[in-house]
Structure formats: C-alpha cells, structure tokens
Image (spheres, helix red, strand yellow):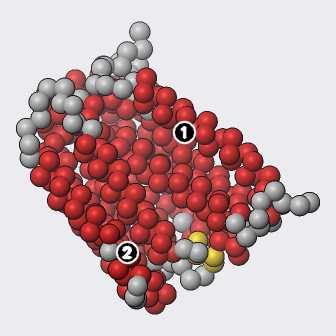
C-alpha cells in the first residue's frame, strides 16, 4: 500500500497532533481541575456557583486527554507501552480520581442536602489526586523515568507544581466567569498561585537542560540561545504583567476579566513549547525518537485521515460550548 503522505513527515505530524491535544487538555481541563480544588475554600452557595461555572465544559475538556492518549497508542505503540509501563501506578490512580470526580459532580447535585457535603469532598479529592498524578507523571517523564530517590523527590515537587498551576488557571477562570466577592477572592487566589506556578515552571526549565548534554547543548549553544531568548523573556514579562494587572480594581462585569485566563493559557503554551523543543525528536529523552516509536507508514496514513475528521469535531464542539455558555456563570439546575 502506498502511503498518502510522505512517511518521513507522518510521525512528525502525529507528534504535533498529540502535543496539541495534551496542551489543550492541560489548559482546558486544568481550569476545571483548579476550580474543583478551589471549591474547598468556599461554602455551599458559592461552591455551587463555582461548580456551575465549569458544568457545561468539563466533559468536553477531558476529551482532549482521551484523544492525546489515543494518538499515542495508535501512532506510537512502542512509546505507549514503555511510558504506561513506567507510569502504571500514577495512571491507575489518575483514572480512579477522574471516575471519582465525574461521579461526585453528578451526585452532589442530586443527593439529599445532608449528604451533599460528602460528594463535595469527593469532588475536591478527585480533582486534587488527578492533578497530583499528572504532575508526578510530568516529573517522571522529564527525568526519563529515573527511579532514584532524588528523582522521586523531583517528581513529587513537580506534582505540587502542577497543582499550583491548575489552581492558578482555575482562579483565572473564576475571575472571568463570576462576579462580586467571589471574583475578588479569585483574584487573591490568582495572585498567590501565580508565583507558585512561576517557581514550578522555573524548576522544570532548569531541570530539563540538566537531564542530558544534548538538551543542554540545544538551549545554550550559539545561535540557538539567542533565538530561544524570547521564550523565557516573554514568560517573565507575562508573569510580571499579570501580577500588576491583578492589582487593579475589577469593576462589576469587567470587560477585561478574560485577560488573566488568556495570559495563563499563553504561559502554559510557552512552557509546553520549551519542553517540546528540548525533547524533539525524542518521545523519551535520548532513548526513543518519534521514528523509532512510530507505527508503519501505511497505518499512520489511514489513522491520519480519521484524526483529521475527529480533531475538528472536538475542537468545534469545545468552541461552540464556550460560545453558547459565554458570560457570567449562573447556578446549575436539574429541575
């Protein structure tokens, strides 16, 4: 069978599609995981409004994770087997947490009032455990699945860092979607978690070049170091600029309430670009590149046709849902 596309480019295309899916998941499901963790700081009425702000979106947001892992499985089966073997325990815990989160989201709205707080606790626990597992997996991936004591400590630090990042983007989502006192509290949450997120991104950025001489050379040799300077400069500028922006008073129905959320998305994208540049063309640092891990060109050609149909549908649905439910959140009702 003759492949529809150049076999050399097929793994690159799939790596790009998989990376885009993971990035969109981190940004989109990141805000609703962050909101899920922040619900622990509020009482019933405000907590209901926080959950309502993510109600129309959280199912669609998780679809990007399914798509990313699905692309890894069908396009890079060798890497899929190796990665999931190394990350078996955190993956299982993450799946349990996602199930707990989904069940508690539905049951909290239908349970008797005296039982509702239990499902609220479960929703918080599911959101927190999901974020911790994903952060641990990120740390393990960056270190090439090193099993040393120091590596485990780094993975735990990465887990806390991603929790901070999700809390940050969740707070930015609330600034955009709610009003009044809750919005003001969300601003304070964003101010605190902004700098925790900056610290976490700095630690990952420092650890990644130290992972291998190849990555270090890619970042710090000429002329690459000059070409790459805009990434850390832009990130630092956005962190400082957002910190200044959050200190300004927010008026009711503030037309600029979207700025923190948009800035958070750009910061996550810049961090993702840095990691992608560091690892390319490897899926696993210095061990397995995208061509070694890829399925046959014939298989990739057929799979790509399906992916080019599925990806626009998921993207279109996400855009449509955010457009339909634009504006400030209102309380959910199942009546």
Image vertical order of residue 185 relative to residue 218, above or below: above
Q: Quadrant of the C terminus?
A: top left
Residue at 59 percent across and 68 percent down: it is 83
**Residue 323 position within the rendered picture, expressed as x and y whole percent measured from the top left:** 42, 27
Q: Helix or strand or loop: what does disc 2 sit on?
A: helix
**Residue 177 position within the rendered picture, expressed as x and y whole percent measured from the top left:** 27, 31
Locate residue 58 relative to residue 114 in the image: left or right: right
Please tell me whether mark 2 or mark 1 is closer to you in this view. 2
Mark-to-mark CA distance, 2 and 1: 29 Å
The label shown at residue 56 is: none
Residue at 33 percent across and 40 percent down: it is 36
The residue wearing badge 1 is 315
- Can you name the residue that lies furthest to the right here? 1
Q: Quadrant of the N terminus?
A: bottom right
Quarter of the image holding residue 46?
top left
Residue at 52 percent across and 62 percent down: it is 89
* Residue 156 seen in render: no
The residue wearing badge 2 is 228
Locate residue 290 relative to residue 273 in the image: left or right: right
Of 309 and 164, nearer the camera is 309
Image vertical order of residue 331 relative to residue 245, above or below: above
């Amino acid at each position: 069978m003759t492949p529809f596309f150049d076999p050399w480019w097929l793994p690159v295309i799939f790596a790009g599609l998989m990376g885009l899916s993971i990035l969109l998941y981190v940004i989109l499901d990141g805000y609703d995981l962050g909101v899920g963790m922040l619900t622990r700081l509020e009482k019933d009425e405000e907590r209901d409004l926080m959950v309502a702000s993510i109600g129309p979106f959280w199912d669609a947001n998780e679809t990007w994770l399914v798509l990313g892992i699905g692309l890894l499985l069908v396009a890079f089966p060798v890497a899929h087997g190796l990665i999931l073997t190394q990350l078996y325990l955190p993956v299982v815990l993450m799946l349990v947490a996602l199930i707990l989160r989904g069940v508690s989201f539905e049951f909290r709205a239908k349970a008797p009032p005296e039982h509702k707080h239990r499902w609220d606790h479960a929703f918080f626990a599911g959101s927190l455990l999901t974020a911790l597992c994903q952060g641990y997996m990120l740390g393990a991936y960056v270190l090439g699945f090193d099993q040393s004591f120091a590596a485990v400590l780094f993975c735990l630090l990465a887990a806390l860092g991603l929790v901070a990042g999700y809390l940050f983007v969740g707070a930015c989502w609330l600034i955009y979607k709610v009003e009044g006192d809750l919005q003001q509290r969300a601003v304070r949450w964003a101010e605190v978690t902004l700098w925790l997120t900056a610290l976490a991104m700095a630690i990952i950025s420092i650890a990644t070049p130290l992972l291998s001489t190849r990555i270090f050379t890619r970042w710090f040799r000429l002329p690459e170091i000059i070409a790459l300077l805009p990434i850390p400069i832009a990130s630092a500028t956005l962190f400082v600029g957002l910190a200044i922006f959050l200190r300004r008073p927010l008026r009711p129905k503030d037309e600029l309430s979207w700025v923190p959320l948009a800035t958070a998305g750009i910061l996550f994208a810049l961090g993702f670009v840095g990691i992608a540049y560091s690892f390319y063309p490897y899926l696993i640092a210095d061990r397995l590149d995208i061509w070694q891990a890829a399925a046959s060109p014939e298989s990739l050609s057929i799979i790509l046709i399906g992916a080019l149909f599925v990806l626009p549908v998921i993207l279109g649905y996400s855009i449509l849902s955010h457009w339909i439910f634009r504006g400030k959140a209102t309380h959910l009702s199942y009546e």
